[in-house]
Image (cartoon, rainbow, N blue to C red):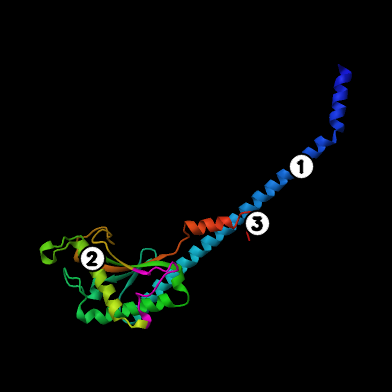
């Protein structure tokens, strides 16, 4: 029995095949670890690039809003930048909407056109439009109910018609070289859109005083930036596959 065990151990120790198998497994393990490290590094780089693009888009949006505000203030037109530098807010008084009316007051038409002109200029500068997805012209009202008998509509309709009224004025009256209705995003879709929110998105928690009512009657120009979609994300992952260039 003792001789048999010693013979078996000597045969195993001298077997070159066991040594080769061990070397192969070690090499494969090292290759797997290296591949995993490379993949992690590539994914980190892709994530960093995506974040850089988002940060750049956010910076461009801030530039558009702040420059628009500065230029309009130089012309004596009062607007505010709100909601984390995503919205250019135009007070109701700036556009001259009468109580329960959606048409821009005649004396306020030049002001409304100047707002459209400035927006066109700041958006068209450099390649800023490439970072934008949609620009919404949003109408808002206060919480007080509108009598349906006056115009056969409620606050939702009033807010939407006010936004439409402003957009149609820009569409019909701005010079062709600065028109807004021809601007397209990178998906070849029209950049501008119109919506009405009625009283559903107030800017003040309480609506009791005339000042609070007035703050909520407004037109917001909301800028949304481009974000990676599913196809872009899949394209990024394909770049990490073996053999990808």
At x 40%, y 71%, the residue is: 184
Q: Earlier in the sequence, mark 1 or mark 2?
A: 1
Identify which residue, 96 or 109, lies in the foreground: 109
Residue 169 falls inside the magenta stretch: no
* Residue 146, position as x, y percentages in the image: 15, 62
Q: Tell me the chief SS of the magenta region.
A: loop
Residue placed most toward the observer, 204 or 49:
49
Q: Nearer the viewer, mark 3 or mark 2?
A: 3
- Can residue 103 be seen from the camera position used here? yes
- Quadrant location of residue 219? bottom left
Range of magenta residues: 177-192
Q: Residue at x 52, y 56 (%)?
A: 234
The kind of secondary structure element at disc 3 is: loop
Cβ–Cβ under 8 Å for marks 1 and 2: no
Front residue of 124/146: it is: 124
Above or below, 12 relative to 76: above
From the viewer's perspective, tell me whether residue 94 is left or right of residue 31.
left
| Mark seen at residue 24 | 1
Looking at the rendered image, the disc whose residue lies closer to the viewer, 1 or 3, is 3
Q: Are marks 3 and 2 in contact (CB under 8 Å)?
A: no
Asked if 5 appears above or below 103 in the picture, the reply is above
Q: Position of residue 118 (x, y in %)?
A: 36, 79
Residue that appears at 27% across and 73% down: 166
Q: Nearer the viewer, residue 167 or 202?
A: 167
Q: Are marks 1 and 3 in contact (CB under 8 Å)?
A: no
Residue 17: x and y, percent? 82, 36
Residue identifier under label 3: 243
Q: Residue at x 39, y 72 (%)?
A: 65
Give the Cα separation between the discs numbered 3 and 2: 55 Å
At which x and y percent is residue 60? 45, 70
């Amino acid at each position: 029995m003792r001789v048999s065990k010693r013979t078996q151990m000597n045969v195993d120790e001298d077997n070159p095949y066991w040594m080769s198998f061990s070397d192969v497994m070690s090499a494969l393990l090292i290759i797997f670890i290296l591949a995993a490290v490379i993949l992690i590094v590539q994914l980190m780089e892709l994530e960093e690039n995506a974040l850089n693009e988002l940060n750049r888009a956010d910076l461009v949006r801030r530039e558009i809003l702040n420059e628009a505000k500065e230029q309009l203030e130089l012309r004596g037109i009062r607007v505010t930048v709100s909601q984390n530098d995503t919205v250019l807010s135009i007070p109701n008084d700036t556009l001259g909407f009468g109580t329960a009316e959606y048409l821009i007051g005649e004396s306020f038409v030049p002001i409304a056109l100047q707002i459209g002109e400035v927006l066109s200029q700041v958006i068209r500068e450099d390649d800023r439009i490439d970072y934008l997805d949609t620009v919404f012209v949003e109408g808002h009202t206060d919480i007080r109910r509108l009598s349906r008998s006056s115009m056969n509509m409620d606050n939702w309709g009033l807010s939407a018609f006010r936004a439409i009224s402003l957009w149609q004025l820009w569409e019909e009256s701005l010079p062709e070289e600065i028109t807004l209705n021809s601007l397209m995003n990178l998906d070849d879709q029209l950049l501008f859109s119109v919506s009405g929110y009625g009283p559903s998105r107030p800017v003040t928690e309480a609506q009791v005083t005339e000042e609070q009512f007035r703050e909520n009657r407004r037109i917001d120009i909301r800028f949304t930036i481009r974000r990676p979609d599913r196809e872009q994300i899949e394209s990024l992952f394909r770049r990490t596959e073996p053999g990808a260039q």
